[in-house]
Image (cartoon, grey):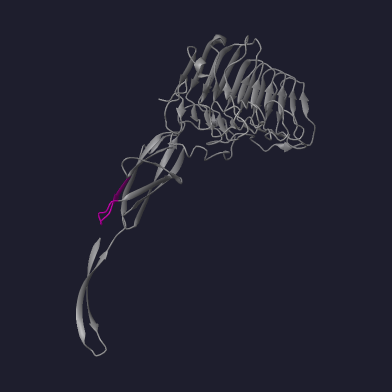
Amino acid sequence: MATLNVAVTATDPTGRVGSGSATITTTSSGIDDGSQNAPAGPPQRPTLLNPYPFKPSWKVAGVHYAVGPKVAPTKIATASMSITVANTVVDGFDFSSGGGFQVNVLAPGVRIINCNFKAGSNAQVPIFSRSTDTYVGYCTIDGGTNVNTTPGALVNSFGVGLRVEYCWLKNAAGDIVDASEGGVIRVNNNLIENGGGLLGAHGDWLQLGGTNRPVDVDVRFNTVYQTNVAAGSQGFMLECNSPQTIAIGKLLNNTMIAVNTVPPGNFATNFLTGVTQALVTGTVEVKDNFMDKSGSAGGFMRPGSLSAKVIVTGNKNMINGKTVNGDNTET
Amino acid sequence: MATLQVTGTVTDAGGLRTPFTGTIVTQSAPVITSVVVSPQSAPTGTLRTITINATDVDGGPLTYTCFVEGVAATATAQPNVFTFVA
């Protein structure tokens, strides 16, 4: 619960001013928005939603609660590390020194938590996994934009299954998260700022890969704030390449702001790439997302493929309060 | 607005006096009698209506402002009514 102060004035024709005040009390939305598991501390972008008359009813990552490490990571001067033991926990390290180091995951069930990454002259993907069920939580991962043309994504997984949550993911030269081997993919409660910093790159916030494993992908309660001008984004992709299929796809309750402009000839920003019907074996829900698509190409990319097995409902334009439909019309 | 009666005399150097009377009109600032927020307590993201009730003894039209934590609320067709999502 929070209390907001209201200040009002009334002015007569001679310029004399009377003033008054009141309060607004905000309570829990009743939505299980995951905020109860957020780290303590001030949120990164507390005023991000102030300009918008229509706001989400849940607590927004990076606005109402912080993301990133729960405790300050310890800076280490070391080379990149490879994890070869299953279920290893990498907890509380700062890999930002010495040009930026990488955690290379070669064993299943590895958890990387409370860590700080910043790509630099080493030009390495901060987290690179080639094993199953990698967990990345409560981390700050800064791609350093395109200074060193770091290849790939901030989190690049070639293993089956991936979860990324409560992270501050920013300044990627290309994608934010790549998940290339299907399985259960979860991207929740993150603050994502600026993918596609490298001119001409697709700064996808989530890119799925193309093997023959079905994907169960759930993306919810993330905040995206895209302001850079180098390139755009295909947003959260709920599509894949044949023969891979989407068994379950959910894009729910995300707050997505694209206010960037893109140089001619480069990708614009989209929030969702279209879903290929033939590759959806279950259903895909795109529901209750809030957006400012000022810098977007329209919102949803390839809207013609959003039909039948794809449920698009309740998505709101935060500027005018209108519902953004799957074909990018607003009603 | 209040009107005050003024009486007095003017005396010149020779001691001649002339009485005078006049009035002073005082104007008062508007008084905000209440600020009603509806709903006052509700989940985050709720559209609130803020109604400012004010009186002005001078009777002139009033203009209003409304800020929530320093952010301007949205004006409506009624000058004393604003909306804000919080």
Q: Quadrant of residue B60?
A: bottom left
Residue B50 in the image, given as x and y percentages of width and height: 36, 41
Query: Is residue A288 positioned above or below A118 on the image?
Result: above
Q: Residue at x 39, y 37 (%)?
A: B41
Q: Does A70 sit above or below residue B35?
A: above
Taking B37 as reference, is A217 above or below it? Answer: above
In the image: residue A7, left or right of residue A269: left
* Image-based side of A151 in relation to A165, left or right: right
Q: Position of residue A102 (x, y in %)?
A: 74, 29
Could you say where residue A128 lies in the image, as x and y percent from the top left?
72, 24
Q: How many marks?
A: 0
Q: Nearer the viewer, residue A1 or A9?
A: A9
User: Which sits in the foreground, A248 or A172?
Assistant: A172
- B31 with respect to A276 (left or right): left
- Quadrant where the C terminus of chain A sits is top left
Question: Is residue A185 found inside the magenta-colored segment of the image?
Answer: no
Q: Residue at x 60, y 21 (%)?
A: A186
Q: Quadrant of residue A322?
A: top left
Nearest to the observer: residue A205 or residue A7: A205
Q: Where does the magenta region start and end?
A: B51-61
Where is residue A115 drawn, in percent x and y?
A: 69, 33
The outermost residue toward the front is A264
